[in-house]
Amino acid sequence: MRPILVILLGALAACGPQYVETIAASDQDLPVRRAVFAQTPAPLELAFRSSCDSPGDEFRQISRSVVQCRILPPPDLAAFLVLQYDGALQAPTLVVQKETDAEADAFVVELSYFAEVVQKSGNARRIYFKQRDLDQLMDQLLAATGGVAANAR
């Protein structure tokens, strides 16, 4: 499964100058892909963890239901993000996030992606992008690991 995440992140990095920031005024503005799993999505869990093992990648357990793979962007994309979003001289991070919620008889998994740029104030600013190619890759990953698409936003 690692090739899917590598392609996903490569596509995110390759399109840097074409990014348009999304003001996340509502959930509809966030690039989220959703799927329902009949049982614990163990293959997706394994694929997500194992694909976050390149040099510079960091796997983070944010909460019981949220995990992130944090990736250092290529230098040209990092420079673009810092300059475009008035960041501090600290490397921005590309983040792929997975959130899993248990419902009555199923598990709902949401995959999302964004860039985090540390501001001069010290706070991180999330930059959301909608990229059709990335959405399709995430849908393929969810389907390949046993999920059924559930009206992705």
Image (tube, helix red, strand yellow):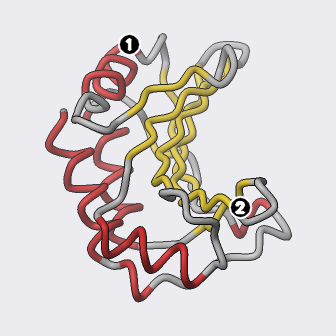
Element marked by disc 1? helix
- Picture layout, residue 45 above or below residue 9: above
- Picture layout, residue 115 above or below residue 85: above
Element marked by disc 2? strand
- Type of the residue with mark 1: Ala
Q: Earlier in the sequence, mark 1 or mark 2?
A: 1
Which residue is found at the position 20% from the left and 55% from the top? 7
Question: Circle 2 sits on which residue?
Answer: 125
Question: Circle 1 sits on which residue?
Answer: 42
Q: Nearer the viewer, residue 137 or 38?
A: 137
Q: Nearer the viewer, residue 100 or 151?
A: 100
The residue at the far front in this view is 89
The crowd level at tag 2 (other Cα within 10 Å; few <14, some 14-19, many 20+) is: some
Which residue is found at the position 43% from the left and 73% from the top? 131
Q: Quadrant of residue 22?
A: bottom right
- Type of the residue with mark 2: Arg
The crowd level at tag 1 (other Cα within 10 Å; few <14, some 14-19, many 20+) is: few
Which residue is found at the position 46% from the left and 54% from the top? 94
Q: Which mark is residue 148?
A: none
Q: Position of residue 112 (x, y in %)?
A: 54, 50
Q: Quadrant of residue 61?
A: top right
Camera-side mark, 1 or 2: 2
Which residue is found at the position 29% from the left and 55% from the top? 8
On the rendered image, what quadrant is the C terminus found in?
bottom right
- Picture layout, residue 77 above or below residue 61: below
Q: Quadrant of residue 20?
A: bottom right
